[in-house]
Amino acid sequence: MKTTGLILATLASLASAQDDGECNIRECGCPPYREKWCDKYNARVFSPICQISKGFCDYTCGEVWCGKSPTPPTPPAPKIHMYHLGNASDIHCYQTNYTDPFYKSLGYVDGFCPFQLVDSEDTLEVCNGHANENTKYCPKDIINITVYKMGKSR
C-alpha cells in the first residue's frame, strides 16, 4: 500500500498546473450536470488515478475532466479496467477492478458505475480467474478483490 501511495504522489506532482479540476463520470459530465441525480459528490470518479490530471482522466480512465482545460467531446477507451453491475436508473451499483467469467455471468460490464458515491466496500478472497470456485481448491492462486457498493446520494 505504501508503494501505491508513493507512486500516486509522484504522478500527482508531475501533473501540470493547467490540470486544475476533477474527473467526473460521463453520465454526469461537468456542471450543470446532465442528470438530475448528479451532484458534486456522486459525479466525481472514485479513483485516485483518474483524479491526478486531465490526461489520466481522459485517456487512462475514459471519463470527463471538468476544469480549466476544455473537455473532449468523446473520451477514448479507458486504459485501466474497471467493471460494474448496475445502471443509471438503479439505486445502487457495484464496482470492482476484477472480472472473470463468473463476474461476467452476473452481469458485470466494462466501465465505472454511472454514479460514484461509495456506500460500502467489501474485500473478498477469490480464486483468480474462477471467483465462484471454493478457495480450498485453489490455495496457491487466491487473490483479494474489493467490490464497492455505490449510491446516488448520501
Image (tube, grey):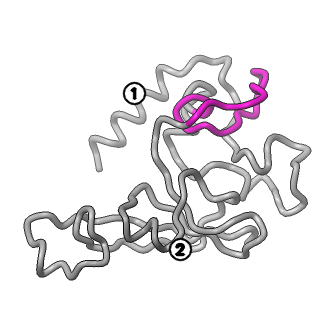
Q: Nearer the viewer, mark 2 or mark 1?
A: 2
Residue 149, how many percent across, how many down?
56, 71
How many numbered marks does the figure carry? 2
Corner quadrant of residue 109: bottom right
Residue 92, how many percent across, how many down?
66, 74
Helix, strand, or loop for circle 1? helix
Image height check: is 132 above or below 34? below
Label 2 sits on what residue type? Ser
Judge left or right: residue 49 versus residue 114.
Answer: left
Name the residue that disc number 2 marks. Answer: 120
Residue 42, how many percent across, how many down?
72, 58
Look at the image and say whether residue 76 sits in the magenta stretch.
Answer: yes
Look at the image and say whether residue 133 sits in the magenta stretch.
Answer: no
Q: Residues within 10 Å of mark 2 (few under 14, many from 20)?
A: few
Corner quadrant of residue 129: bottom left
Name the residue that disc number 1 marks. Answer: 10
CA separation in Å, label 2 and label 1: 28 Å
| Span highlighted in magenta in the image | 57-77
Task: Give the camera-side residue of 121 and 141.
Answer: 141
Image height check: is 31 above or below 108? above
Judge left or right: residue 86 versus residue 125.
Answer: right
Image height check: is 69 above or below 119? above
Q: Looking at the image, which residue is at 77% across and 52% down?
A: 40
For the C terminus, give its image quadrant.
Answer: bottom right
Q: Looking at the image, which residue is at 51% across and 57% down?
A: 83
Label 1 sits on what residue type? Thr
Q: Residues within 10 Å of mark 1 (few under 14, many from 20)?
A: few
Residue 142 is labelled as none
Task: Give the camera-side residue of 151 and 126.
Answer: 126
Q: Looking at the image, which residue is at 36% across and 62% down?
A: 100
Corner quadrant of residue 41: bottom right
